[in-house]
Amino acid sequence: MVSRSYSNLLDLASGEFPSSSFTRMTRQIPRIMTVAGIISDIDDERSESVCSDISSSSVQHDRLIIVANQLPIKAQRKTDGSRGWTFSWDKNSLLLQLKDGLGDDEIDVIYVGCLKEDIHPNEQDEVSQTLLENFKCVPTFLPPELFTRFYHGFCKQHLWPLFHYMLPLSPDLGGRFNRSLWQAYVSVNKIFADKIMEVINPEDDYVWIHDYHLMVLPTFLRKRFNRVKLGFFLHSPFPSSEIYKTLPVREELLRALLNSDLIGFHTFDYARHFLSCCSRLLGISYESKRGYISLEYYGRTVTIKILPVGIHMNQLQSVLNLPETESKVCELMKQFQNQGKTMLLGVDDLDIFKGISLKLLAMEQLLIQHPEWQGKVVLVQIANPARGTGKDVKEVKTETYSTVKRINETFGRPGYEPVILIEEPLKFYERVAYYVAAECCLVTAVRDGMNLIPYEYVISRQGNERLDKVLGLDPSTPKKSMLVVSEFIGCSPSLSGAVRVNPWNIDAVADAMDYSLELSEPEKQMRHEKHYKYVSSHDVGYWAHSFFQDLERTCKDHVRRRCWGIGFGLSFRVVALDLSFRKLSMEHIVSAYKRTTTRAILLDYDGTLMPQSSIDKSPTSSTIEMLNTLCRDKNNMVFVVSAKSRTTLVEWFADCEKLGLAAEHGCFLRLKRDEEWETCVQVEECGWKQNARPVMTLYTETTDGSTIEDKETALVWSYEDADPDFGSCQAKELLDHLESVLANEPVTVKRGQSSVEVKPQGVSKGLVAKRLLTTMQERGMIPDFVLCIGDDRSDEDMFEVITSSVASGELFSQKAEVFACTVGNKPSKAKYYLDDTVEIARLMQGLASVSEQSDNVFVFA
C-alpha cells in the first residue's frame, strides 16, 4: 500500500492542489495560434498565467527568465527609522554578471528566486512590487520551516554530498534519505513554478534554471506549458552512475532534467556521468551530430552543453584599478617580499570538500622534505565561511586549527609564521590584492563543481601599470603566475598549464609546491600567457551568450511539433511529433482494413511481435494463432521479416502454413510453408567468416555478456546482456576492426541494436518488401492496403521502399491505404508509430478479429 506521505507527494507533483498562500492570483490567457491550423496546447487545462506589464513594450525583445535559488539582490532594512527595505544589485552574483553576454538591447531579463533575508508576510506584497518595478525581480517567499527542510535538509544534506561523491553510508556521512525532506524539495520547486507562471509568456519567453536546488522544476513547467523553451545548468559536479544510483529518487530527478531542452555542465566528465545514468537507468542512448550531443526523449531532442563558466572580466579589472587594491598590495609587499618571503595562496570555503587540511599537511611535508624553504615560504590560507552547517563543518574547523597550530609551533620562529590562516571575511579588493602578491595559487579541493579562484588569480597577476610599479616590475616584462590545481575540480581541464595534482597524495602536492617555486621565470611566463588567453576570452559573458545561442537553436523547431503530455507526477513527460508523424489509430486502420480487398502485411519479429527484452524469443501460441487467422483471410498476404536464420524461423513457425517468411534480413525468402526457399541476392562463398570469426571471438572473450550468432550467410556479435557503455564502446571498436579486416570481401559490416552484423552486400529488408509487392503485382493482385511494422534501423529499408512506391505508384495504387509504422516515437521514415509491442499485439489481434468475422473462406493461391 502506498504510504500517505508518498501519495500526498504524487498529488503535489501533479499540480492538482491549491496554490500556496504566497502565490498571487493569476488570470487566464487566451489560446495562442502557433502555425496555420494548429492551436497551441499549452492551455489544454485552461492555462492560468499572467503576462506581466514588463512584457509589453513598443520594441519586441527576446525575454529570458533566469531562475535560481537566490536573487542577485542585496536587501537591507532601512536605518532611518522608517518602515521598509532598501535593495541593491549584488554585483558578485553570477546571475547578474551573465547579463553582459546577453546584451541589454537584445534580451530582457527577469529574475525569479529567493531573498537571503526573511521578509515578514505583511511586507511581501510591497517588496514584490518594488523588486518587480525597479529590478525586474520576482521574489519567491518560502516559510522558514519549509526553507530549512528544502535547503539545509534535502539540498545540503542529500544532494550536495551525493553530487560531491559522498555516499550516505552512515547518518553522519551525508545522512540517510528522508522522504519528508524530499517532499519539501518538491514543494519548493512547485512554488517556484507558480512564481514563473505569473510572468511567463510561454510561447515566446525563454527560461534558464540554475543548479541542483531546482532540478524538478522543469517537470512542473513542462506540464503546464508543453512548448516552454527551457534550459538548465548544473553548477555542481554530477556523480558517476554508481554513486548516483544510490539516490532513492534517482529516476524522478533524471526525468525532470530531461524535460529541459538544453542541459549544461561545466566539464565532459559531468556530462558523461549524466548520459551514463540516462543509459543505465532509463535506457536512453545519446548521439553526436555536427558537434552537438543530444538525446531523443519521447520525440523531443534534449541537447547537452559542455562549457565551464568564466569570470566577470570588467568587474575584476575595475577592482584592480582601485586605490584600495593598490594600497593593500603595497602592504602585502612589505609584509612578504620585502622580508624575503614568498607567498603561496589558498582561498577556499571551510567545508569538507575543499581539502584545506590536506593542503596544510602538504605544506608541512614541503617544509620537512625541503628545509631550505623554512623561513622563506609562507602559505596564506583564506578560509571563507562554509555555506552549510553541521557536524562535518565543525570537524573541518577543528582539524584546520590544530594543524595550523602544529605547523607554526614546529617550523615557526620570531618574525616567521609558515601558515597564516585568515578567517575574517575579506572584501573583494583585499582578496584580489592577495592574488596579485602571491607567487603561486593552490586550489586542491577533493571535489568541486567549477571553482573560479584560479581564473581570478590569473587575471589579477596580469595586473596593470599602477600595480606593476608597486611590484617593481617593468611594464614590458611578461607577467608570470603558477597554479597548483586538483584534478577533481571543474576548471582543471581548461588550465593546461597548471600543475595538476591528486590532493589526497600529500607527497605529490608537496612536490608540486616545490616545483612551482623552483620553476624558471620563462616557464612561468609561458604558462601564465597560455592561461590568460583562455580566461580572458572565455569570461562569464562568453559562457552566457554561448548557452543562450544553443538554447535558441534547440528550441527553434518547437512550433513545428505537435505536443501532448503523458505520465503522472514526476514521471510526466511530453511527447513531441512532427506534423506528418502521428500515432497509428486503431479505428483508422481497422476502417481501412475492412474496406480493402487486397492486403500486404509485413511484420518485423524481434522488437515488434516479440519484445527485445524477452529471454525466450520463440513466438507465443497467441501470436501463432493471430498470424494464422490473418493468413486464412483470402485478401491477405502476410510476411514475417526477421534477422533470424531460416532454420530458426522454420522451427518457430512450423504451424503457420500460409505465412511468408524472410530470413537473415531478407537474404532468404519463402512465400508459404510448402514452397522452397529463394535466395534474394547472389551469395558468394562465406570464406570471409574465417577472417571475421576470430575477431568477433576476441571481442566476445573481452566483453562479458556478449555472444556470437553464426548464420548461413552472416555473423552477428550481440552485446545485449553486456554492460551498455562498455558494450557500445567495444561495438564501435569491433566495427572498425571488421571493416579493416574485410575491406576486400563482398560483405557489409553494420551496427544494429546492441549488435554488430556482417552480411553479404546488397541484402536488406527493403528487398523483401519489393519482392512481396512485385509478386502480388505479377499475380494480378494490386494491393490497396499495405501495413509494414518494424522497430530498428534495418526496418527503415522497408519503410523507404514502401514510401517511394507510394510516390511513384509503381507497385500499388496511389490511392492505396498505406501504413508504415515504427515501434516507439523516434525519428523514422515511417509516418506512423505505436508505443511498444503490447500495442502492436493489440493492433494485430484487432485486425485478426476483423478477418475472423469475415465470410471469406478462400485460400490465397
Image: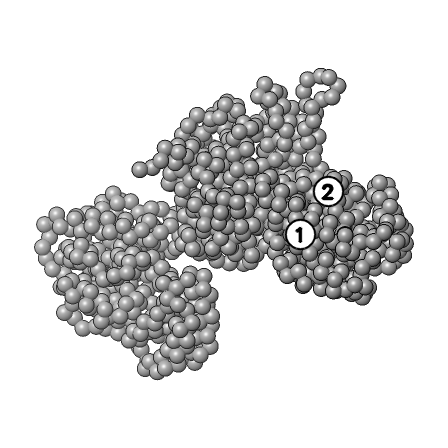
Residue 811: percent from the left, percent from the top? 28, 61
* Residue that numbered label 1 is attached to: 357
Residue 723: percent from the left, percent from the top? 41, 62
Sort mark 1 into few (<14), some (14-19) or many (20+) by Cα contacts within 10 Å. Answer: many
Give the answer, above or below, for where 252 lies relative to 496.
above
Which amino acid type is marked by label 1? Answer: Ser
Give the answer, above or below, for where 92 lies relative to 240.
above
- Mark 1 lies on a secondary structure that is helix
Give the answer, above or below, for where 697 lies relative to 541.
below
Which amino acid type is marked by label 2? Answer: Glu
Residue at point 71% right, 30% down?
88
Residue 84: percent from the left, percent from the top? 67, 20
Give the answer, above or below, for where 652 lies relative to 224.
below
Instruction: Please indicate, yes or no, whether residue 377 appears anywhere in the rendered image.
Output: yes
Residue at point 13% right, 50% down?
852
Instruction: Please indicate, yes or no, whether residue 378 appears anywhere in the rendered image.
Output: no
Residue 497: percent from the left, percent from the top? 71, 61
Sort mark 2 into few (<14), some (14-19) or many (20+) by Cα contacts within 10 Å. Answer: few
Q: Earlier in the sequence, mark 2 or mark 1?
A: 1
Q: Nearer the viewer, residue 87 or 144?
A: 144
Q: To which quarter of the image does residue 747 belong?
A: bottom left
User: Seen in the image, is 216 located left or right of residue 324?
Assistant: left
Q: Nearer the viewer, residue 726 or 684?
A: 726
Instruction: Using the image, tell me which numbered label, if any, was put on residue 423.
Output: 2
Residue at point 39% right, 33% down?
5
